[in-house]
Image (cartoon, helix red, strand yellow):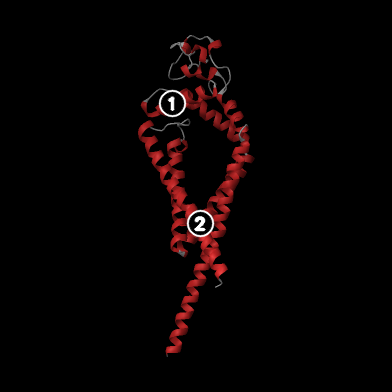
Amino acid sequence: MRKSQRRAYNCIRSILGLLNGLFWILGGGIIGVAIWLQISYNGFVSLLPQHELLSLDSAAFLSGTLLFVIAFCGCSGAWFMNPCLLISYFILIFILCGAELVCGVLGFLYSETLSASLQQELLTGIQTHYNTSKQYTGITLAWDHIQDQLSCCGVHHYEDWFNISAWPGNFYVPHSCCIPSFQYMNDCGQLQEVSMWFPSGCYNKAQNWFKERLHLLGIVGFIVVSIQIFGLISSMILFCFTRRRAGFKTYKAVKSQSFAI
């Protein structure tokens, strides 16, 4: 094999190993954060209690585990030039790309249905689980944080908080719905003075927040896709190289034995 080809293979091997080594560490860190969230906050940011897998700790644990396994195969396969790990890495990345493509197409085709379903699930979470038991304290923390950061109240408007299970028969809102100039009043959400509350709902505010950052999401998506394509190509190149080298060594050994005979 030419020196230039060998240098190219070594360069690909080094980049693939280093890149996946960093993602391996990142995956382990995400798993650690997920465990810490589960222990400390008992499902923090679980806005949809009907779907536990969509809570922040569960989603972080699943994504961290997936990233950890894929990066382990890529890093170890590149470092040890193991064809089994390299082809496993290729298959996992290929399946992940396919899943992302399917989810993207389905999300585009059924965006309105998904949006309506999500809004209904958020309303159900507010009405039945907000501040009602220790099991769902994550909902209270999540909604208070979101309403405070986005300056909003409820899913569509403040009336979403009226007569929920936390205060049946009362037209109250959480204290996080209060306009900053009235937040010094501890009973601001219970005075039924709508002028003290944020008039806009959080769903539209969140949509606008994402729309304003579409270019950043596009850049992140482009980087992720580029890394995945590089992983697919480089892992297959290294896999073919290892198979070719193994076949060459076998052929050389057989040829040597034939001369000895």
Query: Of the numbered discs in the image, which one, if any, rests on residue 104?
Result: none
- Provide the secondary structure element on which disc 2 rests: helix
Q: Residues within 10 Å of mark 1 (few under 14, many from 20)?
A: some
- Provide the secondary structure element on which disc 1 rests: helix
Q: Which mark is first along the chain, 1 or 2?
A: 2
Q: Nearer the viewer, residue 63 or 101?
A: 63
Q: Is residue 174 visible?
A: no
Query: From what the image shows, is residue 126 above or below residue 20?
Result: above
Query: Of the numbered discs in the image, which one, if any, rests on residue 141?
Result: 1
* Label 2 with label 1: CB-CB less than 8 Å: no
Query: From what the image shows, is residue 92 above or below residue 136?
Result: below
Q: Nearer the viewer, residue 221 or 15?
A: 15
Query: Of the numbered discs in the image, which one, if any, rests on residue 16?
Result: 2
Type of amino acid at the residue the image marks with label 1: Leu
To which quarter of the image does residue 120 belong? top right
Type of amino acid at the residue the image marks with label 2: Leu
Point out residue 36 in the picture as x, y percentages from the top left corner.
Answer: 37, 37
C-alpha distance separating marks 2 and 1 = 40 Å
Q: Residues within 10 Å of mark 2 (few under 14, many from 20)?
A: many
To which quarter of the image does residue 137 belong? top left
